[in-house]
Image (spheres, rainbow, N blue to C red):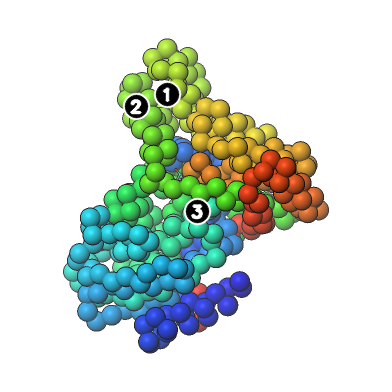
């Protein structure tokens, strides 16, 4: 869908759901992470970009303290008193928007002084594909409420608010990668973020100039971060840091690994090694992009995938197949992206080779008896914003 038709769809949906005009439409993108996986909650480095798939929210303030949410997806409409948002009262998709309103209260908004709101969501970020559809939803609402309630919290506090929503109201122990990408990204660039102190800068990606494209290969294997795999990886990292006497795995370098191997059990050691080497790969990717451009990062993407497959053990056969078949078809580099256990891989490919890579990945999936993946190109795009009237 074009941006204009999505904005119109959000307005029309709002009118049908609430019987009045919205005050405005805001949007926020999904993301892919170029490299730097599971490093965020280890206070390390990440390098995502926002994609040209967005969640749109049409919103209007209310005089009372009621918040009502509705969506174009096949989800129930919900309403709640703004004062009554707790993890215990929340369930289903509305935990994301209501949690976001609650999160704003945690980072400086006085929720006793603001009124309620009606919000209607529509989205072209695929759900469950590992492309941060939940962050897109949270961040679209965060910018909408920040403006509507005249909070002026600033993007960094909106990152914290939406992340708190996900951790404490939705109950998913995720880091700040997804919300940071959705709120801070810019066109044609990757966001180089230090998750320890929140400092960030944009690094030119230069795909256009180099004749390259990023393809997303959505395996359609669903993942859910409230499930055990993600949380158990996080626990292993925290255990590793505790045993090694550091605040976070960010504080370890490659030459600490020998000591780590002596002190940790074999599995925890591999989890730790992924984080230590992945942080290094993010820094190398930034340096390589700056010095030599995107064509030179292929090996780093592949090394990252191998580390997630072998050390962190968060890949699945479909993701491995996506990476291997894209490379066999001539991709410059490829890796799974996001939390793992399903979701999507990305492949960096020559623009002229998009059709060949697509066909060969589809063929490889068919041969292996996997469900047909969804394959599409993504553009590094703008972060959350108000849409023009
Ligand atoms: C998910 C989480 C992020 C991050 C990634 C892995 O997307 O939401 O916080 O941990 O997994 O890099």
Q: Quadrant of the N terminus?
A: bottom right
Cα separation between marks 1 and 2: 8 Å
Mark 2 neighbour density, 10 Å: few (under 14) some (14–19) many (20 or more):
some
Left or right: residue 6 compared with residue 231: right
SS at mark 1?
helix
Cα separation between marks 3 and 1: 28 Å
Q: Earlier in the sequence, mark 1 or mark 2?
A: 2
SS at mark 2?
helix
Residue 172: x, y in percent?
36, 47
Residue 88: x, y in percent?
23, 55
SS at mark 3?
loop
Disc on res. 239: 2
Q: Earlier in the sequence, mark 3 or mark 1?
A: 3
Disc on res. 128: 3
User: Is 179 located above or below residue 236 in the figure?
Assistant: below
Q: In which quarter of the view is residue 19 placed?
A: bottom left
Q: Who's the residue at 38% across and 73% down the image? A: 70
Q: Who's the residue at 41% across and 74% down the image? A: 120
Q: Who's the residue at 67% across and 43% down the image? A: 369
Q: Earlier in the sequence, mark 2 or mark 3?
A: 3
Total labels: the figure holds: 3
Mark 1 neighbour density, 10 Å: few (under 14) some (14–19) many (20 or more):
many
User: Residue lying furthest front in this view?
Assistant: 369
Disc on res. 268: 1
Residue 99: x, y in percent?
31, 60
User: Is 376 located above or below residue 258 in the figure?
Assistant: below
Does residue 47 appear in this view?
no
Q: Is mark 3 within 8 Å of ligand 1?
A: no
């Amino acid at each position: 869908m074009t941006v204009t038709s999505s904005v119109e769809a959000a307005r029309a949906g709002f009118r049908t759901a609430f019987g009045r005009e919205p005050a405005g439409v805001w949007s926020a993108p999904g993301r892919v992470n170029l490299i730097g996986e599971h490093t965020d909650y280890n206070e390390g480095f990440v390098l995502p970009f926002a994609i040209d798939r967005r969640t749109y929210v049409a919103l209007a303030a209310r005089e009372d303290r009621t918040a009502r949410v509705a969506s174009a997806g096949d989800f129930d409409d919900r309403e709640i008193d703004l004062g009554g948002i707790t993890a215990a009262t929340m369930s289903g998709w509305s935990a994301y928007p209501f949690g976001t309103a609650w999160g704003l209260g945690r980072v400086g908004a006085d929720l006793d002084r603001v009124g309620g709101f009606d919000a209607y969501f529509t989205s072209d970020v695929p759900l469950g594909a590992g492309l941060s559809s939940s962050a897109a939803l949270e961040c679209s609402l965060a910018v909408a409420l920040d403006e509507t309630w005249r909070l002026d919290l600033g993007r960094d506090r909106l990152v914290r608010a939406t992340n708190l929503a996900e951790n404490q109201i939705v109950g998913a122990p995720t880091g700040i990668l997804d919300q940071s990408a959705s709120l801070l990204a810019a066109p044609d660039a990757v966001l180089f973020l230090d998750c320890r102190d929140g400092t960030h800068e944009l690094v030119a990606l230069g795909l256009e100039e180099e004749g390259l494209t990023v393809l997303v290969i959505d395996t359609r294997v669903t993942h859910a971060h409230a499930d055990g795999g993600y949380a158990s990886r996080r626990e292993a990292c925290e255990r590793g840091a505790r045993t090694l006497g550091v605040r976070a795995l960010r504080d370890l370098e490659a030459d600490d690994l020998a000591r780590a191997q002596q002190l940790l059990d074999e599995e925890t050691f591999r989890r730790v090694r992924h984080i230590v080497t992945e942080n290094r790969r993010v820094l190398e990717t930034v340096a390589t992009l700056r010095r030599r451009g995107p064509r030179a990062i292929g090996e780093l993407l592949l090394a990252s995938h191998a580390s997630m497959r072998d050390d962190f053990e968060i890949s699945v056969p479909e993701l491995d197949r996506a990476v291997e078949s894209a490379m066999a078809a001539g991709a410059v580099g490829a890796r799974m992206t996001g939390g793992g256990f399903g979701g999507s891989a990305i492949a960096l490919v020559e623009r002229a080779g998009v059709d060949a890579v697509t066909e060969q990945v589809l063929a490889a999936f068919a041969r292996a008896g996997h469900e047909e993946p969804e394959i599409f190109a993504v553009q590094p795009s703008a972060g959350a914003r108000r849409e023009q009237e």
